[in-house]
Image (cartoon, rainbow, N blue to C red):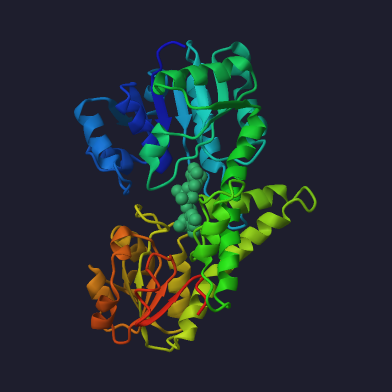
Amino acid sequence: MVKARVSVIGLGFVGLSIALTNSKKQIPTIGVDIEEGKIKKLKNGIPGFFEPQLQSYLDESIKEKLIKFTTNLDYALKNTNLSFLCVGTPPTDDGKINLSFLKKVLKDIHKILKSKKTHHLLVIKSTVVPQTTMNVVLPMFKDLIDKGTVDVVTNPEFLREGSAINDVFNPHLIVIGEYNKKSGKILESFYRQFYKTLPEVIHTDITSAELIKYANNTFLATKISFINSLANICQNLPGTDVNTIAKAIGKDPRIGPLFLQAGPGFGGSCLPKDVSALINFSNKFEKTNELFKAVLSVNQNQPVKVLELLKEFNVLKKNNTVSILGLAFKKDTDDIRAAVSIEIAKLLLKKGLKLKVYDPMAMDNFRKLFKEKITYCSSIDECLRDSDCCLVLTEWDSFRKLKPKKFEKLMKTPNVIDARRILDPKKFSGINFKAVGLGN
Ligand code: UGA
């Protein structure tokens, strides 16, 4: 292909990571977003959220003038020949996905590309349910596709929050959904320029590529709900530990060791949303989604299972204080979207308990949600002081190092619940200690 000049449309966590990794590879890149405030911040070197390495990539790209940020879609499209569409498809209340942002930007893109003479490749990165590209995107661009000036491919993304930059540079697979060989080849040759050694590429039809994204996330969610179901059994079986079970079954190469970490349930902006959307989408095909429904229902019940541990300590009493260590949906992010901490905090407040919380990154986001209803602490020590129970909800490295002595010294009663399995039960045997998946 002619040398790629890339625009990335939608600068959320996926879009910004893709934009900055492109500029790092010296590919001229323009980042576009509809939000003026976001663009202003980005121009000033402020990403607006925490993601490891992102800040230094942003600083470098700005310093070396490798990236431009703009709200001007017209400028971005006319000065590039390949656009990654990373617009959000947030969940609706009934578990579908909201396509309105995507549809609006596609309409604007179509209008602009109509007057462009040279070829443009539109790469759909946004997660959309199967057949969306076929039924919504392609009809919109039919005139330009027929004319030969525009092509559309779907190219689902597998990067994770907390390791986004590394995941862009080291993907396990590239999936290209295409309706003709030419469009898929253009994207593949772009990736040939991007990667020194091209990762494995699978070319599929457009709809299969969309389904692969859902299948991937739903399978990961299934592994988590599976191990959490076993954890809930272990809790009733003295002497057992779900981690031992996970370690053993993970050695079977047909199962594999990853995503078998029992905990308070999966959260984040992707797994819960994608399982719900797949259920909703497949409702029209009779009895094809019973497993997915179970995966979601196990997950929705997991915070209740964590509260049962508090009950066993007899701390679920009005005006008792619970300290929550960890608010982010996982470590190395400040993201609290669909984080289990939200559900647990709501349940505890409803029961009249007082909450003290601490997280290395996600405090501001949590404060926006719970305002003055809870106490925000600036350190682990402050969070633990005079509390009746401590609940570890995120697997931050700084929590892993905690010793029982600290809890004994600071808390009113050292009741500790490890919902992430990052503390060694043997070391904590001297104090009141319970953990997800630990039978005692
Ligand atoms: C997920 C997928 O892992 C990515 O491949 C995908 O690209 C992304 O969604 C997306 O669709 O954009 P992410 O949401 O960043 O990535 O987070 P995960 O690492 O998948 O974790 C999701 C949740 O599962 C977290 O709450 C995590 O704590 C939990 N989890 C994960 C467990 O409880 N146990 C595990 O063993 C693994």
**Picture coordinates of residue 30 (x, y %)?**
35, 27
Q: Is residue 34 visible?
A: no
Vertical placement of residue 333 versus 144, above or below: below
Name of the residue lying farthest toward the right = 286
Q: Is residue 396 visible?
A: yes
**Picture coordinates of residue 179 (x, y %)?**
65, 22
**Picture coordinates of residue 91 (x, y %)?**
55, 52
Front residue of 230/163: it is 230
**Picture coordinates of residue 425 (x, y %)?**
40, 73
Residue at the image position 47 percent from the left and 38 percent from the top: 87
Residue 66: quarter of image? top left
Name of the residue lying farthest toward the left = 63
Vertical placement of residue 415 versus 266, above or below: below
Residue 290: quarter of image? bottom right
Front residue of 110/247: it is 247
Residue at the image position 44 percent from the left and 69 percent from the top: 419
Question: With 61 as the anchor, is 110 left or right in this view?
Answer: right
Question: With 111 as the anchor, is 57 left or right in this view?
Answer: left
Q: How many marks?
A: 0
Residue at the image position 46 percent from the left and 81 percent from the top: 310
Front residue of 257/47: it is 257
Vertical placement of residue 298 versus 37, above or below: below
Residue at the image position 60 percent from the left and 72 percent from the top: 233
